[in-house]
């Protein structure tokens, strides 16, 4: 693409001294300061676009774009999308179909709260991602256990700076919005299949890029995502409802530019918006998407960031899918065998193991990592799903058991833009 890239990260890069214009170390807990740092850099090295690539980076990306007068989502809209309580409030005010909710203090007596909520419900942290800390409860005793477990997860996340939010310096301390370490959310559980919508927003208008079915039921008690398949097998009118619901949610949040990744439940009353993230799909899942004559999702996003009038080509219509390989149990990874056998399954393109030997692993709800990814393309979405399941069945994961510890909770990636 002939585009020069500077990576902004919250951790210094060992190679930065060899190529100082390729790396910037930024304070991701202070977007205003990070924007000042980038503006100082841009005075000597002009910047044409900023692309945040994960949840921790989106507030920084918005602040930098605002400082440099580049097209961007507002800082307020990005903060709203990254905080589940603010998201729910804005959806409620705008009439976006979404679960009923209740904000609860982390230090409240869980037995008192348990008598006040509706069941079944889902407890979740305000700012973590990857379904970490998200737990279903069907009665009061399950709620008390879930709230206690969530509290430990949040405390560990705060100690390791995972998902912690910067303080809004424009608000007094007493008026700070609820954060990861002060409150958690209780939502009504909505039974039904879940889908994910990948899209691109230009001047506030959503252009859908791909709708993914999630064929594995996500009924709890934890919500580990595994298989994504596109194109969706849902009826055309339901797909249209999903797009309309997502457009309404984007408008409610105030998002106006760049990629979005939305999660939607299909309940008895139609689509219900779970969340909209102001970034593209996570991990290696984007590798399943191709556009035009082979353009990747990342290239599409960069071209859109550089050109407000860029029109994305149509997605390759060959059915495709990805399986995020779940962590089966806590312990230290010894190895994953059977890769060649898994890749020999018809329709499988490749198997990518991203966890490394010796790495300490935790399943949900404490963990947020996957072992790796399986990619498939076939003649139909059903054939894609079958190939992914067969390939996964041929993998053998060896994990040395260890006693789970809340301190083992760790972020899935470092933040960058």
Image (cartoon, rainbow, N blue to C red):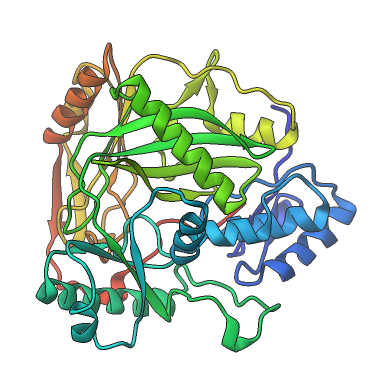
x 45%, y 26%: residue: 289
Q: Nearer the viewer, residue 206 or 331?
A: 206
Q: In screen coordinates, is 124 left or right of 207?
A: left
x 38%, y 27%: residue: 239
Percent x, y of residue 18 = 71, 53
Q: Quadrant of residue 413?
A: bottom left
Q: Nearer the viewer, residue 4 or 150?
A: 150
Percent x, y of residue 11 = 58, 65
Q: Is any atom of residue 135 visible in this view?
A: yes
In the rendered image, the residue lying farthest to the right is 43
Q: Is residue 276 above or below residue 395?
A: below
Q: Quadrant of the N terminus?
A: top right
Q: Nearer the viewer, residue 86 or 62?
A: 86
Q: In screen coordinates, is 218 left or right of 142?
A: right
Q: Quadrant of residue 183?
A: bottom left
Percent x, y of residue 365 = 24, 63
Q: In screen coordinates, is 44 left or right of 352?
A: right
x 50%, y 46%: residue: 249
x 15%, y 69%: residue: 402
Q: How many marks?
A: 0
Q: Is any atom of residue 280 visible in this view?
A: no
Q: Is residue 376 above or below residue 51?
A: above
Q: Is residue 319 above or below residue 62?
A: above
Q: Is residue 37 above or below residue 259?
A: below
Percent x, y of residue 113 = 24, 81
């Amino acid at each position: 693409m002939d585009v020069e890239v500077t990576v902004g990260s919250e951790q210094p890069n060992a190679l930065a001294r060899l190529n100082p214009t390729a790396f910037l170390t930024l304070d991701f807990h202070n977007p205003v300061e990070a924007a000042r740092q980038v503006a100082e850099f841009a005075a000597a090295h002009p910047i044409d676009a900023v692309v945040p690539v994960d949840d921790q980076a989106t507030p920084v990306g918005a602040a930098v774009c605002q400082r440099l007068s580049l097209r961007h989502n507002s800082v307020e809209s990005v903060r709203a999308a990254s905080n589940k309580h603010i998201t729910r409030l804005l959806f409620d005010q705008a009439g976006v179909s979404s679960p009923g909710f209740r904000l609860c203090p982390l230090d409240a007596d869980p037995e008192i709260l348990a008598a006040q909520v509706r069941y079944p419900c889902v407890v979740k942290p305000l700012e973590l991602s990857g379904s970490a800390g998200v737990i279903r409860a069907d009665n009061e005793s399950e709620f008390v256990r879930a709230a206690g477990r969530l509290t430990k997860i949040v405390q560990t996340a705060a100690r390791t700076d995972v998902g912690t939010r910067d303080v809004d310096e424009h608000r007094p301390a007493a008026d700070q919005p609820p954060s990861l370490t002060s409150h958690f959310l209780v939502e009504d559980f909505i039974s039904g299949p879940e889908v994910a919508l990948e899209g691109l927003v230009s001047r506030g208008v959503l252009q859908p890029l791909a709708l993914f079915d999630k064929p594995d039921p996500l009924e709890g008690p934890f919500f580990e995502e595994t298989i994504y398949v596109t194109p969706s097998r849902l009826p055309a009118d339901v797909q249209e409802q999903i797009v309309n619901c997502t457009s309404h949610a984007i408008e409610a949040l105030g998002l106006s530019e760049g990629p979005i990744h939305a999660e939607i439940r299909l309940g008895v009353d139609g689509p219900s918006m779970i969340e909209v993230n102001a970034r593209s799909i996570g991990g290696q899942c984007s590798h399943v998407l191709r556009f035009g004559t082979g353009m990747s999702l990342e290239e599409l996003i960069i071209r859109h960031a550089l050109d407000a009038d860029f029109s994305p080509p149509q997605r390759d219509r060959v059915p495709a899918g990805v399986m995020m390989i779940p962590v089966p149990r806590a312990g230290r990874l010894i190895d994953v065998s059977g890769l060649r056998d898994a890749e020999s399954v018809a329709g499988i393109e490749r198997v990518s193991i991203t966890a490394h030997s010796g790495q300490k692993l935790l399943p949900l709800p404490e963990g947020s990592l996957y072992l790796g990814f399986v990619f498939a393309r076939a003649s139909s979405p059903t054939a894609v799903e079958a190939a992914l399941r067969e390939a996964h069945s041929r993998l053998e994961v060896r994990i040395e058991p260890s006693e789970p510890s809340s301190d083992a909770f760790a972020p899935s990636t470092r933040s960058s833009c």
